Image (cartoon, rainbow, N blue to C red):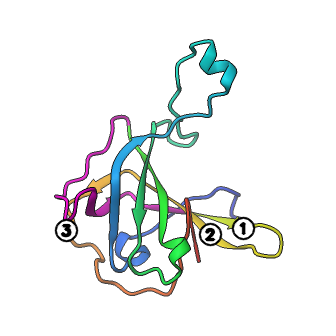
């Protein structure tokens, strides 16, 4: 039995991110590309909808403190929800807050160009949960990370 392309593997937050994640900035709608012609014609910007779940896509920039490669430490996370997800934690510095995710999935991808390709993952989550609420926090794993696709 083959695993179909685009399969999303459920994963525990603490296993994927042993030192947690830091949200940088705010959660924003993930919008479709709008051409100059569309803008000049006054067409509205459309928010992307996930093909599998039918939920709206939101994006947030996060940083993984356990990532050793600085270029892959920060990446865009996709949140799937009907309404905009709101972080449950307070800012530790202006614009920075520790977060934990509910309903986390990882989708394997090949990233990079030419001979510099590497294994990456697209992470999606259903929303936020209170940081430190458990379920695997502090679990160590041997994996890497990346951009909007988190590399291994």
Task: Residue at 21% x, 63% y: name it.
Answer: 93
Mark 2 Cα shell of 10 Å, populated few (<14), some (14-19), many (≥20):
many
Q: Of the residues tagged 3 and 2, which is closer to the observer?
A: 2
Q: Residue at horizontal 67%, vertical 24%?
A: 36
Q: Is residue 59 above or below residue 107?
A: above
Residue 133 image label = 3
Residue span colored magenta: 82-106
CA separation, marks 3 and 1? 35 Å
Is 120 placed left or right of 105 in the picture? right
| Circle number at residue 112 | 1
**Contact between labelled residues 1 and 2, with CB atoms less than 8 Å apart:** yes
Residue 2 in the image, given as x and y percentages of width and height: 73, 65
Specify whether residue 36 is painted magenta: no
Q: Secondary structure at mark 2?
A: strand
For the view shown, which residue lies furthest in the left direction? 90
Quadrant in which residue 15 is drawn:
bottom left
Q: CA distance from mark 2 to mark 1?
A: 9 Å
């Amino acid at each position: 039995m083959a695993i179909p392309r685009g399969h999303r593997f459920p994963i525990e937050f603490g296993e994927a991110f042993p030192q947690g994640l830091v949200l940088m900035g705010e959660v924003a709608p993930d919008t479709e590309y709008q051409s100059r012609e569309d803008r000049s014609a006054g067409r509205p910007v459309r928010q992307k909808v996930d093909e599998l779940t039918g939920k709206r896509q939101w994006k947030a920039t996060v940083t993984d403190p356990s990532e050793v490669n600085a270029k892959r430490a920060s990446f865009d996370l996709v949140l799937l929800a009907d309404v905009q997800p709101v972080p449950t934690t307070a800012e530790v510095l202006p614009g920075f807050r520790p977060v934990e995710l509910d309903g986390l999935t990882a989708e394997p991808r090949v990233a990079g160009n030419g001979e510099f390709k590497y294994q990456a993952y697209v992470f999606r989550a259903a929303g936020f949960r209170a940081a430190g609420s458990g379920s695997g926090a502090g679990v160590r794993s041997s994996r890497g990370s990346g951009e909007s696709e988190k590399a291994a």
